Image (spheres, rainbow, N blue to C red):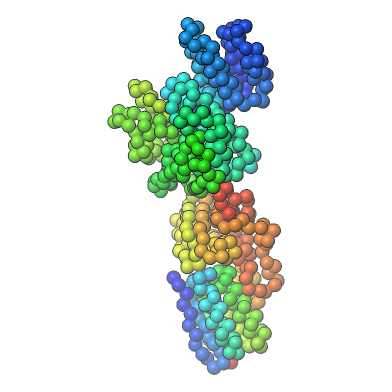
């Protein structure tokens, strides 16, 4: 199972949907896309419904997104996180750091 | 047939006394005083190794043969001395052969004096040093060269870090002592790291070692250079060594007396040896050794050559998973799949399975990123023992500075450095013990399954 990554525009928000396995072989792609959207000063929602696995390098890409957004004064949120991904986020105690929405629709409304 | 037992010095003191008494009775005043003194000294120096006593005995036989050449007393004297030497030599073999030991060995001489030897030395660092050797030719001269070689091994067994330079050092010494009579010694030396089942082996002109894996496959460890004692440059310090992993399997070392032994169907050969090993594979190692010997040494056929066999077996539980792969970021997914599959096959629940997958994945990517800086060889082993799961991850990258390995504080929200924390969360304990010889780093992660 490889990574799937799609980007949709919703107003000023980029919805990045991740699926499959995020690991050392592809986390730099996630990082690149997240940072590119933020560099263009878009708000970013990362939808993680179909993430089957995420490792520390994938989590690091999200942390970098969180920090970059803060610096640029734009919003960064995670939405609809799959149980395996949430388990890893909790392991790193990052579930209290990120803005997290249960549903993608909520995240998009909140961002508008 | 007798499997040699662990030895203590006490056994030798009896022999020494006999040695002394018989010498005196036999030689009377014609025997040189200095020689008598040396023999008496051997009797009293209880710390002296049996090897040097044996060598003295051989010196004495040489002396006898020079002095009593053609005399009628010679035959009887030689017979008695040979008997004694053979007795001492029998006692010399095997440092540790009993019970559930990881290294077992046995040697059956074809005549009184053997040109074969094996030795097992338990070291203070927990490693087991072992060696098997075969001296060309037979009889007295071969036995003398055998004694020299095995005492050189024994002298260095506690201190060497790699078997290659050890064989090179023994070779240099044998070449220095060589009479140029064409005699040589084939030898395998190795170090076993019992807790990981890792072995570092060097083979100088000896019969290939045979590793019989848990999956039933054989791999053969061929000689990397010519035998010892011929020329110094033939066995260089940097001779090729091999790192092997028992992984629930067993390594068999033998002398050519084994493969050339005659059974009812002719010579055994390597194919025959493999069949015998397969047939005996289910037996516990000590019984296996006996069973193999029973099939090799047909009592109806007098052995033509000395026959020596060693078993280096994994006494730990068989691993749920063993992998030795050239790992890269692209191959991490495949490794996660294998770990998950092994955990499921062992009936572990899904949460524990994903913890194991995460721990192995994070450990592996640390190795790729910080150890190799790219793809590299990674060994992974998963063992379940009494409700405790152990993951061992071994690499061949430069040994890491332990002081620099520490999980980052979680309060600092920063990318990177999280992997170690994940490993610590997923497993109960992480440790980096001294890596097996020939490898770079060993990470041991354990988790109690309650």
Furthest residue to the left?
B265
Residue B410 lies, in percent from the top left, at 68, 69
Furthest residue to the front?
B180
Residue B358 lies, in percent from the top left, at 55, 64
Quarter holding residue B365? bottom right
The residue located at (70%, 67%) in the rendering is B409
Is residue B223 visible to us here?
A: yes
Relative to B392, residue B194 above or below? above
Relative to B295, residue B234 above or below? below
The residue located at (56%, 82%) in the rendering is A34
The residue located at (62%, 24%) in the rendering is B9
Is residue B194 visible to us here?
A: no
Closer to us: B42 or B228:
B228
Closer to us: B262 or B160:
B160
- Look at the image and tell me in which quarter the C terminus of chain B lies: bottom right
Closer to us: A26 or B47:
B47
């Amino acid at each position: 199972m490889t990574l799937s990554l799609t980007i949709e525009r919703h107003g000023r928000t980029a919805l990045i949907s991740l699926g499959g396995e995020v690991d050392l072989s592809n986390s730099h792609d996630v990082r690149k896309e997240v940072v590119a959207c933020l560099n263009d000063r878009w708000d970013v929602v990362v939808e993680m419904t179909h993430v089957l696995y995420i490792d520390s390098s994938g989590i690091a890409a999200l942390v970098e997104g969180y920090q970059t957004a803060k610096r640029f004064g734009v919003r960064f949120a995670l939405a609809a996180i799959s149980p395996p991904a949430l388990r890893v986020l909790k392991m790193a105690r990052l579930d209290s750091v990120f803005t997290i929405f249960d549903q993608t629709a909520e995240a998009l409304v909140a961002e508008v | 047939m007798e499997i040699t037992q662990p030895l203590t010095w006490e056994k030798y003191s009896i022999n020494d006394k006999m040695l002394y008494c018989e010498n005196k009775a036999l030689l009377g005043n014609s025997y040189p005083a200095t020689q008598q003194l040396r023999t008496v000294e051997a009797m009293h120096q209880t710390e002296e190794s049996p090897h040097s006593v044996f060598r003295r005995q051989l010196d004495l036989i040489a002396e006898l043969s020079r002095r009593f050449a053609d005399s009628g007393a010679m035959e009887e004297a030689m017979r008695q001395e040979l008997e004694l030497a053979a007795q001492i030599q029998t006692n010399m073999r095997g440092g540790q052969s009993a019970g559930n030991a990881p290294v077992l060995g046995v040697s059956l001489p074809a005549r009184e004096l053997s040109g074969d030897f094996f030795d097992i030395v338990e070291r203070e660092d927990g490693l087991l040093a072992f060696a098997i050797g075969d001296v060309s030719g037979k009889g007295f001269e071969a036995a003398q060269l055998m004694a020299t070689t095995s005492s050189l091994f024994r002298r260095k067994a506690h201190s060497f870090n790699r078997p290659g330079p050890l064989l090179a050092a023994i070779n240099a010494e044998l070449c220095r002592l060589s009479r140029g009579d064409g005699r040589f010694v084939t030898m395998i030396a190795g170090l076993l790291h019992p807790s990981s089942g890792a072995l570092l082996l060097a083979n100088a002109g000896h019969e290939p070692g045979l590793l019989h894996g848990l999956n039933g496959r054989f791999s053969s460890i061929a000689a990397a250079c010519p035998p010892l004692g011929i020329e110094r440059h033939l066995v260089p310090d940097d001779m090729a060594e091999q790192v092997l992993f028992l992984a629930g399997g067993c390594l068999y070392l033998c002398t050519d007396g084994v493969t050339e032994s005659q059974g009812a169907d002719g010579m055994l050969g390597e194919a025959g040896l493999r069949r015998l090993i397969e047939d005996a594979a289910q037996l516990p190692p000590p019984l296996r050794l006996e069973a193999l010997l029973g099939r090799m040494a047909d009592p109806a056929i007098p052995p033509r050559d000395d026959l020596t066999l060693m078993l280096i077996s994994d006494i730990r539980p068989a691993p749920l998973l063993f992998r030795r792969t050239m790992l890269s970021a692209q191959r991490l997914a495949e490794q996660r799949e294998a770990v998950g599959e092994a955990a499921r096959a062992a009936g572990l629940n899904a949460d524990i399975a994903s913890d194991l997958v995460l721990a192995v994945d994070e450990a592996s990517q640390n190795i790729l990123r910080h150890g190799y800086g790219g793809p590299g060889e990674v060994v992974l082993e998963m063992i379940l023992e009494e409700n405790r799961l152990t993951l061992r991850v071994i690499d061949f990258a430069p040994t890491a500075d332990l002081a620099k390995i520490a999980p980052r504080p979680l309060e600092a929200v920063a990318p990177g450095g999280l992997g170690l924390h994940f490993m610590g969360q997923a497993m109960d304990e992480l440790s980096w013990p001294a890596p097996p010889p020939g490898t770079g780093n060993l990470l041991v992660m354990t988790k109690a399954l309650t």
